[in-house]
Amino acid sequence: MNTHSFEHELKQLAAPPPDPAARERARRAALEEFQRRPGTVHQLHSPRRWRPLGPWSSGLAAASIAAVGVAVYWLLPPEERVLAIGEPATSPSVPAYTELKRDEPEPPQSSTARAERSAITTAPPPPKMELPAVETPPPVMDIMIPQEALPASAISNATDRPRPAVAPAPPPPPLQASTRALEEVQVTGSRRVSREFDSPMAVTTIIADTLESENRDKFQHFDVNPVKRAAEEPVSTFSADVDTASYSYVRRQLDDGVLPPADAVRVEEMVNYFDYAWPAPASRSAPFQPTITVSDSPWGTGKKLVHIGIRGFDLPAARRPDVNLVLLLDVSGSMNSPDKLPLAQRSMALLLDSLKPTDTVAIVVYAGAAGQVLAPTPVREKQAILDALGSLRPGGSTAGAAGIQLAYELAGRSFRKDGVNRILLATDGDFNVGITDREALKSLVERERDKGVFLSVLGFGQGNYRDEMAQTLAQNGNGVAAYIDTLNEARKVLVEQASAALFTIAKDVKLQVEFNPATVAEYRLVGYESRGLNREDFNNDQVDAGDIGAGHVVTAIYEITPAGSSAQLIDERRYATGTDAPPRGRVAPGEYGYLRIRYKLPDSTRSRLIESPIRTRASVPAALRQDVQFSTAVAGFAQLLRGGRYTGGLSFEDVLREAQASRGEDPYGYRAEFVQLVRRAMQARGIQ
Amino acid sequence: MDDPQTTVLIRRAQDGNASAFGELVDSHYDTIYRFAWKWCRHRANAEDIAQQACIKLAASLAQFRFEAAFTSWLYRLVVSCAQDWQRSQQRHLHAELSGDEPQPDDSRTEDAIYIGQLLEQLESLGEGMKETALLVHAEGLSHAEAGAILGVSESTISWRVHTMRKQLQRREPLASIHA
């Protein structure tokens, strides 16, 4: 059999013909469902439980999109959401379903049934993000009300009496139906509710119709980086990422008492939210130097974690280049919320404090139309800028050309050849900045980047936030994407890290690690899924990658399984040839691998190279111990929020303990806040 | 895209014609069931998944707008049902380690065991691997079709196929089944 490839084996996989009785059951169940839903979705609308989202509610009835039921839940405003969590268990109508199930005669596999029963009372699992996004009206929210998915008769029956038969009696199933099927047919009428579907939601879920539109996810789905064998794929390449938007978004969700959707959690952004004491380069000959430590993995016995830490040098104020900043603010009606436009205005005001008097600021707004609010104005005329900022009102529409083009035009007008030219886009997710085609928008941002005008994106608010779009634009604009939920966060991003956000010290920073198969059996890059590069991209200076600002701290973590460890996940190849094991070339028993970093200076198009071996004895210096421990705790937490595929027995409790033990000095209280966040996750998990 | 007959059936069913809908289910039940079986290789479970998919089809057919092939749309629905089923299985297994997990089908031949282990191993390679392998290899769909069904780009599918091949090709069959 092993003479064939696995593809061949799969091709040969032949299902037995379906059982006509099963087919008939399915057909009847589907027909019953069909007749309850005569064509249009809006008839099922139940205002009490699923309120359509405000801005999108018009045209809902006609919109023929549906979504995975649980996903919709994330679109609801927080207060509704909490309600929605509670309801499957408490609403008078929903227990009908639960009771119905309880009436079920104990099936033969009682353990499964018991497990299922407990599952019924728990709320649906955190949704996969198949969220439709914002360019067109997202899904109709009037979907899938559990009780309506059941025949009315079933509900009344179930609530008053656990009588097995439910009217209207269906034709009896054909004789050849199995006994197992018969039992259940008795219970639920002609529609057999599969025992395996454990939540009421699941039964009535409608599929997200994303097939019919382009990818409209708010959070782009990505696969978790898998474990790789050093002997088969020794080289791992990725781009630096200094964004932290994911952390703020996750914090916001947890503050609201819910676990964030998995795809909203990017491990590297959670880790990079915090400052670590990786040393800055001693000389200015390179903008940064890597710090490499090796420690034991807290979630994999026998495994080790390799931390690669980078700190860009910081610019003293006197050496900071001039700044030509254009604020591009979304003032559409949806920004009318204290945590949106008002917060954006206050954030921008904070930013002024970190600029020099000779720097200039211009303001452009967009809503239905776009307009210039303030021509490029030196920061020394601070009051004029503050007045202009303060005059902005949500919902106002101003005449003018498309917002983003106008912003680039202004930036071009006051272009500083040796300075920093940047657009700061503040939005709650409406990227209707004048160009609706995403690719066209992206290419505009790229063209302007090549001319020297960069773009950063600040996200505000909730319910409409389009993470993927923010990421895409910022990445292509040599900028950062940050999510600002509080004034504190604004201070962190725009004041403490202003130089990092404004002054790029290295462009297109790529990291490549070649693992040594003699010492490393397997490795896994923790996070950076959306930043993966091909091996050949590393030396190709045409390939864009992440940028590092002054004082930026970037951390990457690899989990490795040393050769000969029993923690290995992938079996040795039986027929391995000399080409991979044992390795040819240099056998370096003292090295786990070799790190190469490529970067470009901000005004250069040619990359430079930094190299460093990863030594097996690179233990953690005492000064960095807390930082390694804390970053590991954050990485563990983020992976747990993503589902914890590779974290073994690690629990939130473990994360809490580790994080508390490594809080250190914590001058701004960020780490203390993280500890609170872990507690919130434990509570949210309890609810869900 | 779809054959005219199917298109007519869908339109009539969308207009509320129950017998057209019944016909539609009849003509696609095989596809649905066979995929479900390949997913779990267990008759009763496959029947459950397939029935769930038929119910979902009834609930969501109104949303089908002929912008994608009906079969792709249907596959997406079945894959989602299969994933739901699998999640609930895993939860049960975690909840109670009683060990009475559903055994693969009656045909406990070497081939069946091998395929079971193969699919498990594919799954362990990363998210979406099993789905990709089944759609591309077992169902014979193109990378573009599989991408459309799974909601990822064609290149992601190609990358997955490539990765699986690299990881599994010529590897020893996964356990000593001859022992």
Image (cartoon, coloured by chain):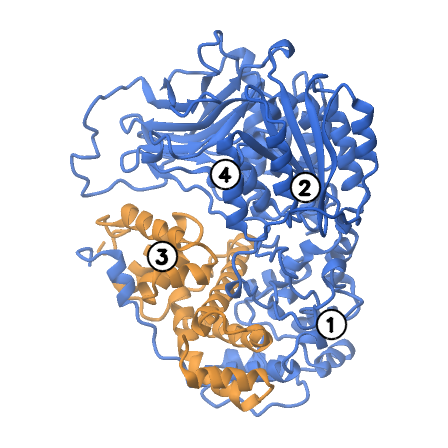
Q: Residue at x 54, y 66 (%)?
A: A196
Mark 3 Cα shell of 10 Å, populated few (<14), some (14-19), many (≥20): many
Quick check: A5 above or below A533?
below
Crowding around mark 4 (Cα neighbors within 10 Å: few <14, some 14 to 19, many 20+) is many
Q: CA distance from mark 1 to mark 2?
A: 34 Å
Q: Secondary structure at mark 4?
A: helix
Question: Foreground: B34 or B90?
Answer: B34
- Indicate which disc, 4 or 2, sits on the residue closer to the N terminus: 4
Instruction: Characterize the local packing of mark 2: few (<14), some (14-19) or many (20 or more) Cα atoms within 10 angstroms.
Output: some
Q: Is residue A276 left or right of residue A660?
A: left
- Name the residue type under label 1: His
Chain painted orange? B
Mark 4 = which residue?
A: A446
Tell me, for residue B119, which label it has, or none. Answer: 3
Q: Which residue is mark 1?
A: A45
The structure residue drawn at horizontal position 40% and vertical position 69%, both measured from the top left corner, is B35
